[in-house]
Amino acid sequence: MKPKYFCGVAAVLCIALIPYVSAQAQDATVAGHTGVPQDWSLHHIVFSRDGLLQHPDLLYRERRVLHQAMQRWQAPNSDVFHGVDPHPATADDLSHHRDWSVNLSGRLDANMFPAKFSFDAGGPPSCANDYVVFGLAVAGVTGGAANLVAYNNLYAGTGGLCGAAPTVLFAYNITTATGGKIVTSPILSYDGTKIAFVESIGSSAIFHVLTWTAGQGTIKAAAAPTEMTSLTFSPTYNSTTSSPWIDYGSDTVYLGADGGQLYKITGVFKGTPTLAGTPWPVMVSKNLRLTAPVLDLNRGVLMVGSANGTLYQVNVTTGALATLVVGSGGTSPGIVAAPIVDVTNGTTFVVSANDGTSAVLVEADTSSVTMLAKARLGRGSAGGTALNLYEPAFTNNYFTNPANGNVLLCGTGAADTTPWQYSFGFTGRTMKTTPAGSLQLLTSTAARCTGWTEFYNPNVSGGTDFFFFGLTQDCTATGAAGGCVVAHTGANTYTKATVDGGPSGIVIDNYSTAGQASSIYFTAEKIDTAYKFTQNGLQ
Protein backbone atom coordinates (compact mmCIF):
# COMPACT_ATOMS: atom_id res chain seq x y z
CA MET A 1 0.00 0.00 0.00
CA LYS A 2 1.38 3.37 -0.95
CA PRO A 3 1.81 5.49 2.22
CA LYS A 4 0.24 8.92 2.49
CA TYR A 5 2.15 11.89 3.87
CA PHE A 6 1.21 15.28 5.20
CA CYS A 7 3.41 18.18 4.11
CA GLY A 8 1.36 21.19 5.05
CA VAL A 9 3.52 22.14 8.03
CA ALA A 10 7.08 22.60 6.88
CA ALA A 11 9.32 20.66 4.54
CA VAL A 12 11.51 19.38 7.36
CA LEU A 13 8.50 17.85 9.14
CA CYS A 14 7.33 16.24 5.92
CA ILE A 15 10.77 14.74 5.35
CA ALA A 16 10.87 13.52 8.95
CA LEU A 17 7.54 11.75 8.58
CA ILE A 18 8.29 9.85 5.37
CA PRO A 19 10.38 7.07 6.94
CA TYR A 20 7.97 6.83 9.87
CA VAL A 21 4.88 6.43 7.71
CA SER A 22 6.73 3.99 5.44
CA ALA A 23 7.73 1.95 8.49
CA GLN A 24 4.14 1.96 9.73
CA ALA A 25 2.90 0.76 6.34
CA GLN A 26 5.45 -2.06 6.43
CA ASP A 27 4.49 -2.93 10.02
CA ALA A 28 0.84 -3.07 9.03
CA THR A 29 1.68 -5.51 6.24
CA VAL A 30 3.88 -7.74 8.33
CA ALA A 31 2.52 -7.56 11.87
CA GLY A 32 -1.11 -6.48 11.59
CA HIS A 33 -3.16 -3.33 11.34
CA THR A 34 -2.28 -0.11 13.16
CA GLY A 35 -4.98 2.46 13.84
CA VAL A 36 -5.52 5.55 15.97
CA PRO A 37 -6.34 5.11 19.68
CA GLN A 38 -7.84 8.23 21.28
CA ASP A 39 -8.12 8.19 25.06
CA TRP A 40 -7.80 10.39 28.15
CA SER A 41 -4.07 10.92 27.56
CA LEU A 42 -4.09 12.40 24.06
CA HIS A 43 -4.52 16.04 25.08
CA HIS A 44 -2.20 15.81 28.08
CA ILE A 45 0.72 16.03 25.65
CA VAL A 46 1.09 19.37 23.88
CA PHE A 47 3.85 20.80 21.69
CA SER A 48 4.62 23.54 19.19
CA ARG A 49 5.58 23.36 15.53
CA ASP A 50 8.73 25.37 16.13
CA GLY A 51 9.62 23.02 18.98
CA LEU A 52 9.16 19.98 16.74
CA LEU A 53 11.66 21.42 14.30
CA GLN A 54 14.19 21.18 17.13
CA HIS A 55 12.99 17.74 18.32
CA PRO A 56 11.69 15.95 15.18
CA ASP A 57 12.38 12.57 16.81
CA LEU A 58 9.27 13.11 18.93
CA LEU A 59 7.17 12.40 15.85
CA TYR A 60 8.63 8.89 15.89
CA ARG A 61 8.74 8.31 19.63
CA GLU A 62 5.50 9.88 20.93
CA ARG A 63 2.51 8.92 18.82
CA ARG A 64 0.27 11.40 20.59
CA VAL A 65 2.40 14.11 18.98
CA LEU A 66 2.21 12.49 15.56
CA HIS A 67 -1.57 12.09 15.63
CA GLN A 68 -2.20 15.66 16.74
CA ALA A 69 0.24 17.04 14.18
CA MET A 70 -1.50 15.13 11.40
CA GLN A 71 -4.87 16.37 12.60
CA ARG A 72 -3.94 20.02 13.10
CA TRP A 73 -1.79 20.79 10.08
CA GLN A 74 -3.87 19.55 7.20
CA ALA A 75 -5.63 21.53 4.54
CA PRO A 76 -9.44 21.30 4.68
CA ASN A 77 -10.86 18.04 3.27
CA SER A 78 -7.50 16.27 3.48
CA ASP A 79 -7.82 12.48 3.21
CA VAL A 80 -5.13 11.93 5.84
CA PHE A 81 -6.20 11.20 9.43
CA HIS A 82 -9.86 10.31 9.19
CA GLY A 83 -10.59 11.07 5.60
CA VAL A 84 -13.72 12.49 4.06
CA ASP A 85 -16.64 10.65 2.58
CA PRO A 86 -16.66 10.51 -1.25
CA HIS A 87 -19.84 12.60 -1.14
CA PRO A 88 -19.35 14.78 1.93
CA ALA A 89 -22.04 16.78 3.67
CA THR A 90 -21.50 20.47 4.22
CA ALA A 91 -20.86 21.97 7.63
CA ASP A 92 -24.39 23.40 7.58
CA ASP A 93 -25.80 19.95 6.81
CA LEU A 94 -23.89 18.45 9.73
CA SER A 95 -25.28 20.95 12.21
CA HIS A 96 -28.82 19.73 11.52
CA HIS A 97 -28.19 16.01 11.86
CA ARG A 98 -29.39 14.10 14.91
CA ASP A 99 -27.10 12.08 17.14
CA TRP A 100 -27.78 9.22 19.58
CA SER A 101 -27.80 8.23 23.23
CA VAL A 102 -27.88 4.69 24.66
CA ASN A 103 -28.70 3.26 28.06
CA LEU A 104 -25.90 1.55 29.98
CA SER A 105 -25.73 -0.46 33.20
CA GLY A 106 -23.56 2.25 34.80
CA ARG A 107 -21.59 5.40 34.13
CA LEU A 108 -18.09 6.85 34.21
CA ASP A 109 -16.84 8.58 37.35
CA ALA A 110 -16.27 12.34 37.11
CA ASN A 111 -13.24 13.30 35.02
CA MET A 112 -12.87 9.75 33.69
CA PHE A 113 -12.98 9.14 29.95
CA PRO A 114 -14.15 6.58 27.41
CA ALA A 115 -11.66 5.51 24.71
CA LYS A 116 -12.21 5.72 20.95
CA PHE A 117 -10.50 3.62 18.29
CA SER A 118 -10.34 4.74 14.66
CA PHE A 119 -9.33 1.93 12.33
CA ASP A 120 -7.65 3.83 9.50
CA ALA A 121 -5.73 7.10 9.86
CA GLY A 122 -5.75 7.56 6.09
CA GLY A 123 -9.24 6.41 5.16
CA PRO A 124 -12.91 7.25 5.67
CA PRO A 125 -14.55 6.53 9.04
CA SER A 126 -15.46 2.86 9.38
CA CYS A 127 -18.87 1.73 10.63
CA ALA A 128 -17.67 -1.79 11.39
CA ASN A 129 -14.18 -1.16 12.77
CA ASP A 130 -14.29 2.18 14.60
CA TYR A 131 -15.56 1.83 18.17
CA VAL A 132 -15.87 3.60 21.51
CA VAL A 133 -15.50 1.73 24.82
CA PHE A 134 -16.80 2.71 28.26
CA GLY A 135 -15.39 1.34 31.53
CA LEU A 136 -18.26 1.66 34.00
CA ALA A 137 -18.20 2.22 37.76
CA VAL A 138 -20.52 -0.71 38.46
CA ALA A 139 -19.61 -2.73 41.54
CA GLY A 140 -20.59 -6.34 41.21
CA VAL A 141 -19.77 -10.01 41.27
CA THR A 142 -18.60 -12.29 38.53
CA GLY A 143 -21.39 -12.67 35.98
CA GLY A 144 -23.10 -9.42 37.00
CA ALA A 145 -24.01 -6.33 35.00
CA ALA A 146 -21.90 -5.23 32.03
CA ASN A 147 -19.14 -2.87 33.14
CA LEU A 148 -16.98 -2.78 29.99
CA VAL A 149 -19.11 -1.91 26.97
CA ALA A 150 -18.19 -0.95 23.40
CA TYR A 151 -20.23 0.28 20.45
CA ASN A 152 -19.52 0.33 16.73
CA ASN A 153 -21.66 1.75 13.89
CA LEU A 154 -20.90 5.00 15.68
CA TYR A 155 -21.74 7.33 12.83
CA ALA A 156 -25.44 6.54 13.04
CA GLY A 157 -28.47 8.79 13.06
CA THR A 158 -30.21 11.07 10.59
CA GLY A 159 -27.93 11.57 7.60
CA GLY A 160 -25.29 9.31 9.11
CA LEU A 161 -23.10 6.63 7.55
CA CYS A 162 -24.07 3.71 9.79
CA GLY A 163 -27.83 3.34 9.94
CA ALA A 164 -30.25 4.51 12.59
CA ALA A 165 -28.43 3.54 15.79
CA PRO A 166 -25.09 2.27 17.10
CA THR A 167 -24.54 -1.43 17.78
CA VAL A 168 -23.16 -3.13 20.88
CA LEU A 169 -19.78 -4.50 19.80
CA PHE A 170 -19.26 -6.32 23.09
CA ALA A 171 -20.47 -6.11 26.69
CA TYR A 172 -18.38 -7.76 29.41
CA ASN A 173 -18.57 -8.13 33.13
CA ILE A 174 -14.89 -8.00 34.04
CA THR A 175 -15.34 -8.31 37.80
CA THR A 176 -12.97 -10.92 39.23
CA ALA A 177 -13.69 -10.25 42.91
CA THR A 178 -16.82 -9.07 44.73
CA GLY A 179 -17.15 -5.30 44.47
CA GLY A 180 -14.67 -4.97 41.61
CA LYS A 181 -15.40 -2.11 39.21
CA ILE A 182 -13.72 0.25 36.73
CA VAL A 183 -13.35 3.78 38.08
CA THR A 184 -10.44 5.04 35.96
CA SER A 185 -10.06 5.47 32.19
CA PRO A 186 -9.24 2.55 29.86
CA ILE A 187 -6.47 2.59 27.24
CA LEU A 188 -6.20 0.83 23.87
CA SER A 189 -3.56 -1.08 21.97
CA TYR A 190 -2.33 0.49 18.78
CA ASP A 191 -4.19 -2.04 16.63
CA GLY A 192 -7.37 -1.73 18.70
CA THR A 193 -7.63 -5.44 19.49
CA LYS A 194 -6.78 -5.07 23.19
CA ILE A 195 -8.03 -2.88 26.02
CA ALA A 196 -6.16 -2.29 29.28
CA PHE A 197 -7.89 -1.06 32.43
CA VAL A 198 -7.85 -1.26 36.22
CA GLU A 199 -10.30 -3.18 38.37
CA SER A 200 -10.61 -1.49 41.77
CA ILE A 201 -11.71 -3.82 44.55
CA GLY A 202 -11.63 -1.59 47.62
CA SER A 203 -8.48 -2.88 49.26
CA SER A 204 -6.45 -3.78 46.17
CA ALA A 205 -6.20 -3.10 42.45
CA ILE A 206 -5.80 -5.38 39.42
CA PHE A 207 -4.45 -4.42 35.99
CA HIS A 208 -6.25 -6.27 33.18
CA VAL A 209 -5.52 -6.59 29.46
CA LEU A 210 -8.52 -7.86 27.52
CA THR A 211 -8.51 -9.21 23.97
CA TRP A 212 -12.10 -8.61 22.98
CA THR A 213 -14.33 -10.60 20.65
CA ALA A 214 -17.11 -8.98 18.67
CA GLY A 215 -20.61 -10.09 19.55
CA GLN A 216 -19.90 -11.25 23.09
CA GLY A 217 -22.52 -10.13 25.61
CA THR A 218 -25.28 -7.55 25.77
CA ILE A 219 -26.00 -4.72 28.19
CA LYS A 220 -28.49 -6.85 30.14
CA ALA A 221 -26.65 -10.16 29.69
CA ALA A 222 -22.94 -9.46 30.06
CA ALA A 223 -20.35 -11.98 28.91
CA ALA A 224 -17.37 -13.11 30.94
CA PRO A 225 -14.04 -12.33 29.25
CA THR A 226 -12.62 -15.33 27.43
CA GLU A 227 -9.13 -13.92 26.88
CA MET A 228 -7.90 -11.60 29.63
CA THR A 229 -4.61 -11.37 31.53
CA SER A 230 -4.70 -10.07 35.11
CA LEU A 231 -1.97 -8.64 37.34
CA THR A 232 -2.53 -7.48 40.93
CA PHE A 233 -0.20 -4.51 41.04
CA SER A 234 -1.38 -2.99 44.32
CA PRO A 235 -2.13 -5.72 46.89
CA THR A 236 -3.04 -3.39 49.77
CA TYR A 237 -4.51 -0.22 48.22
CA ASN A 238 -7.25 0.61 45.77
CA SER A 239 -6.61 2.66 42.61
CA THR A 240 -9.37 5.21 42.04
CA THR A 241 -7.83 8.35 40.53
CA SER A 242 -4.75 7.34 38.52
CA SER A 243 -5.58 6.11 35.01
CA PRO A 244 -2.85 4.12 33.22
CA TRP A 245 -0.42 5.89 30.89
CA ILE A 246 0.90 3.77 28.01
CA ASP A 247 4.30 4.34 26.40
CA TYR A 248 3.66 2.58 23.09
CA GLY A 249 7.32 2.48 22.11
CA SER A 250 8.42 0.42 25.11
CA ASP A 251 5.02 -1.28 25.67
CA THR A 252 5.08 0.04 29.24
CA VAL A 253 2.32 1.36 31.50
CA TYR A 254 2.73 3.71 34.46
CA LEU A 255 -0.07 4.16 37.00
CA GLY A 256 -0.66 4.97 40.65
CA ALA A 257 -2.46 3.52 43.65
CA ASP A 258 -4.30 5.30 46.47
CA GLY A 259 -1.44 4.60 48.89
CA GLY A 260 0.70 7.07 46.94
CA GLN A 261 2.83 4.52 45.07
CA LEU A 262 3.60 4.78 41.36
CA TYR A 263 3.97 1.48 39.48
CA LYS A 264 5.57 0.40 36.20
CA ILE A 265 4.20 -2.54 34.19
CA THR A 266 6.05 -3.94 31.15
CA GLY A 267 4.90 -6.21 28.33
CA VAL A 268 1.45 -4.64 28.32
CA PHE A 269 0.09 -5.31 24.82
CA LYS A 270 2.90 -7.23 23.10
CA GLY A 271 3.98 -9.57 25.88
CA THR A 272 2.94 -10.63 29.37
CA PRO A 273 2.15 -7.79 31.81
CA THR A 274 4.85 -7.86 34.50
CA LEU A 275 5.61 -5.57 37.43
CA ALA A 276 8.96 -3.82 37.08
CA GLY A 277 11.45 -4.27 39.91
CA THR A 278 13.69 -1.79 41.72
CA PRO A 279 13.27 1.17 41.89
CA TRP A 280 9.58 0.39 41.25
CA PRO A 281 7.14 0.95 42.81
CA VAL A 282 8.15 4.49 43.72
CA MET A 283 6.58 6.00 46.84
CA VAL A 284 5.47 9.46 45.72
CA SER A 285 3.14 10.74 48.47
CA LYS A 286 2.40 8.24 51.21
CA ASN A 287 -1.29 7.46 51.79
CA LEU A 288 -2.38 10.17 49.35
CA ARG A 289 -4.07 9.63 46.01
CA LEU A 290 -2.23 10.42 42.80
CA THR A 291 -3.43 11.75 39.48
CA ALA A 292 -2.68 9.82 36.33
CA PRO A 293 1.01 10.25 35.41
CA VAL A 294 2.14 11.89 32.17
CA LEU A 295 5.40 10.79 30.54
CA ASP A 296 7.80 13.29 28.96
CA LEU A 297 9.81 10.99 26.70
CA ASN A 298 12.15 13.80 25.75
CA ARG A 299 13.35 14.17 29.34
CA GLY A 300 12.72 10.68 30.72
CA VAL A 301 10.44 11.82 33.53
CA LEU A 302 6.88 11.31 34.70
CA MET A 303 4.86 14.28 35.94
CA VAL A 304 2.14 13.46 38.46
CA GLY A 305 0.01 15.39 40.95
CA SER A 306 -1.06 14.42 44.46
CA ALA A 307 -3.97 15.06 46.79
CA ASN A 308 -1.55 17.09 48.94
CA GLY A 309 -1.37 19.74 46.19
CA THR A 310 2.21 18.92 45.16
CA LEU A 311 3.45 18.34 41.61
CA TYR A 312 6.02 15.53 41.45
CA GLN A 313 8.64 14.69 38.87
CA VAL A 314 9.69 11.01 38.83
CA ASN A 315 12.82 9.93 36.94
CA VAL A 316 11.83 6.76 35.07
CA THR A 317 15.35 5.30 35.30
CA THR A 318 16.30 5.99 38.91
CA GLY A 319 12.94 6.70 40.57
CA ALA A 320 14.35 9.97 41.95
CA LEU A 321 11.76 12.58 42.96
CA ALA A 322 11.64 16.34 42.55
CA THR A 323 8.73 18.43 43.84
CA LEU A 324 6.89 21.71 43.50
CA VAL A 325 4.16 22.76 45.94
CA VAL A 326 1.22 24.03 43.88
CA GLY A 327 -1.78 23.86 46.20
CA SER A 328 -2.79 22.73 49.65
CA GLY A 329 -4.95 20.00 51.12
CA GLY A 330 -7.65 20.73 53.69
CA THR A 331 -10.93 21.66 52.01
CA SER A 332 -9.24 21.25 48.63
CA PRO A 333 -8.43 17.79 47.28
CA GLY A 334 -5.10 19.16 46.07
CA ILE A 335 -4.46 18.23 42.43
CA VAL A 336 -7.08 15.96 40.84
CA ALA A 337 -6.49 16.34 37.09
CA ALA A 338 -3.39 14.91 35.44
CA PRO A 339 -0.73 17.46 34.42
CA ILE A 340 -0.45 18.68 30.84
CA VAL A 341 3.10 18.48 29.52
CA ASP A 342 4.59 20.45 26.63
CA VAL A 343 7.25 18.02 25.43
CA THR A 344 8.91 20.48 23.03
CA ASN A 345 9.06 23.59 25.21
CA GLY A 346 9.82 21.79 28.48
CA THR A 347 6.87 23.02 30.52
CA THR A 348 4.17 21.40 32.66
CA PHE A 349 0.75 22.82 33.57
CA VAL A 350 -1.27 21.80 36.61
CA VAL A 351 -4.40 23.06 38.38
CA SER A 352 -5.30 23.23 42.08
CA ALA A 353 -8.50 24.57 43.64
CA ASN A 354 -6.63 26.13 46.58
CA ASP A 355 -3.08 27.33 47.18
CA GLY A 356 -4.08 28.98 50.47
CA THR A 357 -5.25 32.15 48.72
CA SER A 358 -7.16 31.10 45.61
CA ALA A 359 -7.53 28.51 42.88
CA VAL A 360 -4.48 28.45 40.60
CA LEU A 361 -3.12 27.33 37.26
CA VAL A 362 0.64 26.83 37.58
CA GLU A 363 3.22 26.49 34.81
CA ALA A 364 6.47 24.77 35.81
CA ASP A 365 9.74 24.04 34.08
CA THR A 366 9.61 20.29 33.58
CA SER A 367 13.33 19.64 34.02
CA SER A 368 13.95 21.74 37.14
CA VAL A 369 10.36 21.57 38.54
CA THR A 370 10.54 25.28 39.31
CA MET A 371 7.60 27.60 38.90
CA LEU A 372 7.50 29.75 35.79
CA ALA A 373 4.07 31.33 36.31
CA LYS A 374 1.05 31.18 38.61
CA ALA A 375 -2.33 32.40 37.35
CA ARG A 376 -5.20 32.87 39.80
CA LEU A 377 -8.61 31.39 39.00
CA GLY A 378 -10.90 32.97 41.58
CA ARG A 379 -11.71 31.87 45.11
CA GLY A 380 -11.91 28.14 44.42
CA SER A 381 -11.75 26.19 47.68
CA ALA A 382 -9.92 28.93 49.56
CA GLY A 383 -13.19 30.14 51.08
CA GLY A 384 -13.84 26.78 52.74
CA THR A 385 -16.12 25.16 50.14
CA ALA A 386 -14.64 21.92 48.82
CA LEU A 387 -14.67 21.73 45.02
CA ASN A 388 -12.59 20.27 42.20
CA LEU A 389 -11.03 22.06 39.26
CA TYR A 390 -9.84 20.12 36.24
CA GLU A 391 -7.54 20.33 33.24
CA PRO A 392 -7.30 23.26 30.82
CA ALA A 393 -7.11 23.15 27.02
CA PHE A 394 -4.88 25.02 24.58
CA THR A 395 -5.89 26.87 21.43
CA ASN A 396 -4.79 25.54 18.06
CA ASN A 397 -2.52 28.57 17.66
CA TYR A 398 -0.49 27.41 20.67
CA PHE A 399 0.59 24.36 18.66
CA THR A 400 2.20 26.62 16.08
CA ASN A 401 3.83 28.99 18.57
CA PRO A 402 2.89 29.38 22.26
CA ALA A 403 3.33 33.15 21.98
CA ASN A 404 0.35 33.20 19.60
CA GLY A 405 -1.84 30.91 21.69
CA ASN A 406 -3.94 30.82 24.83
CA VAL A 407 -4.85 28.33 27.52
CA LEU A 408 -8.51 28.13 28.62
CA LEU A 409 -10.10 26.53 31.67
CA CYS A 410 -12.68 26.90 34.42
CA GLY A 411 -12.23 28.60 37.76
CA THR A 412 -14.65 30.38 40.06
CA GLY A 413 -15.69 33.90 40.89
CA ALA A 414 -13.23 36.07 42.77
CA ALA A 415 -15.46 36.12 45.86
CA ASP A 416 -17.76 33.11 45.35
CA THR A 417 -17.93 29.63 43.82
CA THR A 418 -19.85 30.46 40.65
CA PRO A 419 -18.18 28.90 37.57
CA TRP A 420 -16.06 31.24 35.47
CA GLN A 421 -14.09 30.79 32.27
CA TYR A 422 -10.50 32.09 32.18
CA SER A 423 -8.09 32.55 29.30
CA PHE A 424 -4.35 33.30 29.52
CA GLY A 425 -1.86 34.22 26.82
CA PHE A 426 1.89 33.64 26.64
CA THR A 427 5.14 35.54 26.34
CA GLY A 428 7.42 33.08 24.59
CA ARG A 429 6.82 29.79 26.38
CA THR A 430 5.80 31.45 29.66
CA MET A 431 2.15 31.95 30.57
CA LYS A 432 0.97 35.45 31.41
CA THR A 433 -0.66 35.72 34.82
CA THR A 434 -3.17 38.44 33.92
CA PRO A 435 -6.19 36.94 32.15
CA ALA A 436 -6.63 37.72 28.48
CA GLY A 437 -10.33 37.27 29.25
CA SER A 438 -12.70 35.98 31.89
CA LEU A 439 -16.42 35.34 31.86
CA GLN A 440 -18.99 34.18 34.39
CA LEU A 441 -20.63 31.05 32.96
CA LEU A 442 -23.46 30.71 35.51
CA THR A 443 -24.71 32.64 38.53
CA SER A 444 -25.21 29.38 40.47
CA THR A 445 -22.84 28.83 43.39
CA ALA A 446 -23.71 25.11 43.41
CA ALA A 447 -22.87 24.36 39.77
CA ARG A 448 -19.43 22.95 39.01
CA CYS A 449 -17.38 23.00 35.82
CA THR A 450 -15.67 19.97 34.27
CA GLY A 451 -12.33 19.73 32.48
CA TRP A 452 -11.85 21.16 28.98
CA THR A 453 -11.07 19.27 25.76
CA GLU A 454 -10.03 21.01 22.53
CA PHE A 455 -10.31 19.85 18.92
CA TYR A 456 -9.42 21.80 15.77
CA ASN A 457 -11.66 20.92 12.82
CA PRO A 458 -10.46 22.43 9.50
CA ASN A 459 -13.70 21.46 7.75
CA VAL A 460 -16.10 23.61 9.77
CA SER A 461 -16.46 27.25 8.69
CA GLY A 462 -13.00 27.31 7.15
CA GLY A 463 -11.43 26.00 10.35
CA THR A 464 -12.99 26.00 13.84
CA ASP A 465 -11.27 25.53 17.17
CA PHE A 466 -13.80 23.68 19.35
CA PHE A 467 -13.64 23.55 23.15
CA PHE A 468 -15.89 21.14 25.04
CA PHE A 469 -16.67 21.07 28.76
CA GLY A 470 -19.63 20.60 31.07
CA LEU A 471 -21.61 22.21 33.88
CA THR A 472 -23.14 20.00 36.55
CA GLN A 473 -26.43 21.80 37.29
CA ASP A 474 -28.48 24.99 36.86
CA CYS A 475 -27.50 25.14 33.20
CA THR A 476 -30.49 25.91 30.98
CA ALA A 477 -30.18 24.02 27.72
CA THR A 478 -32.82 23.05 25.15
CA GLY A 479 -35.52 24.37 27.43
CA ALA A 480 -34.64 22.40 30.57
CA ALA A 481 -32.76 23.25 33.74
CA GLY A 482 -30.01 20.86 34.81
CA GLY A 483 -26.52 19.87 33.83
CA CYS A 484 -25.23 20.38 30.31
CA VAL A 485 -22.40 19.82 27.88
CA VAL A 486 -21.04 23.01 26.30
CA ALA A 487 -19.29 23.68 23.00
CA HIS A 488 -17.30 26.93 22.91
CA THR A 489 -16.06 28.22 19.56
CA GLY A 490 -14.60 31.61 20.44
CA ALA A 491 -15.94 35.15 20.65
CA ASN A 492 -18.16 34.12 23.59
CA THR A 493 -20.06 31.70 21.35
CA TYR A 494 -21.53 28.77 23.29
CA THR A 495 -23.81 25.91 22.34
CA LYS A 496 -25.39 23.84 25.13
CA ALA A 497 -27.19 20.51 25.30
CA THR A 498 -28.85 19.05 28.38
CA VAL A 499 -26.95 16.26 30.15
CA ASP A 500 -28.17 15.21 33.59
CA GLY A 501 -25.40 16.01 36.06
CA GLY A 502 -23.10 17.20 33.30
CA PRO A 503 -20.70 15.03 31.26
CA SER A 504 -17.87 12.71 32.21
CA GLY A 505 -14.55 13.22 30.46
CA ILE A 506 -15.05 13.82 26.72
CA VAL A 507 -13.25 12.14 23.82
CA ILE A 508 -13.44 13.49 20.28
CA ASP A 509 -13.07 11.51 17.08
CA ASN A 510 -12.75 12.86 13.52
CA TYR A 511 -12.78 15.93 11.37
CA SER A 512 -14.48 14.06 8.53
CA THR A 513 -17.30 15.83 6.72
CA ALA A 514 -19.23 12.57 6.32
CA GLY A 515 -22.61 12.54 8.05
CA GLN A 516 -22.43 12.07 11.83
CA ALA A 517 -18.68 11.34 11.64
CA SER A 518 -17.29 14.32 13.59
CA SER A 519 -18.50 13.83 17.14
CA ILE A 520 -17.85 13.74 20.87
CA TYR A 521 -18.51 10.85 23.31
CA PHE A 522 -19.13 10.70 27.07
CA THR A 523 -21.58 9.50 29.72
CA ALA A 524 -23.91 11.53 31.92
CA GLU A 525 -23.01 11.89 35.59
CA LYS A 526 -26.50 11.31 37.03
CA ILE A 527 -28.04 8.75 34.66
CA ASP A 528 -26.69 5.56 33.10
CA THR A 529 -26.55 6.93 29.57
CA ALA A 530 -23.81 7.28 26.96
CA TYR A 531 -24.03 10.13 24.46
CA LYS A 532 -22.72 11.02 21.04
CA PHE A 533 -23.09 14.63 19.92
CA THR A 534 -21.86 16.25 16.73
CA GLN A 535 -18.99 18.68 17.26
CA ASN A 536 -20.74 21.34 15.24
CA GLY A 537 -23.97 22.31 16.98
CA LEU A 538 -24.13 19.45 19.52
CA GLN A 539 -26.88 17.81 17.47
Image (spheres, rainbow, N blue to C red):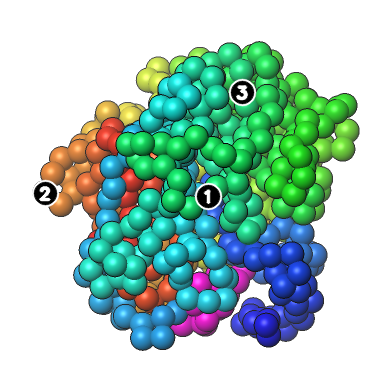
**Residues at marks 3 and 2, CA–CA distance in whole angstroms:** 43 Å
Question: What kind of element bears circle 3?
Answer: strand
Q: Per the image, is 76 magenta?
A: yes
- Residue 262 relative to residue 216: left or right: right
Report x, y in % for residue 202. 53, 16
Along the line of sight, which residue is nearer the eye, 159 or 497?
A: 159
Q: Earlier along the polypeptide chain: callout 1 or callout 3?
A: 3
| Image: 194 above or below 135 | below
Estimate how packed mark 2 is, as few (under 14), some (14 to 19) or many (20 or more) residues with alpha carbons within 10 Å: few
- The residue mark sitting in front, 1 or 3, is 1
Q: Is mark 2 on a helix, strand or loop?
A: loop
Residue at left 70%, top 25%? 233
- The answer to which of marks 1 and 2 sits earlier in the sequence is 1
| Rendered position, 514 above or below 331 | below
Which numbered tag is attached to residue 205? Answer: 3
Residue 53 pos. (x, y %)? 75, 71
- Is 311 positioned to the left or the right of 137 in the image? right
Residue ID for mark 1: 213
Lateral position of residue 43 relative to residue 411, left or right: right
Give the magenta range. Answer: 69-83
Label 1 SS: loop
Residue 84 is situated, as x and y percent measured from the top left of the image, at 44, 79
Query: What residue type is disc 2 on?
Result: Gly
Amino acid found under the numbered disc labelled 3: Ala
For image coordinates 51% across by 27% down, the residue present is 175
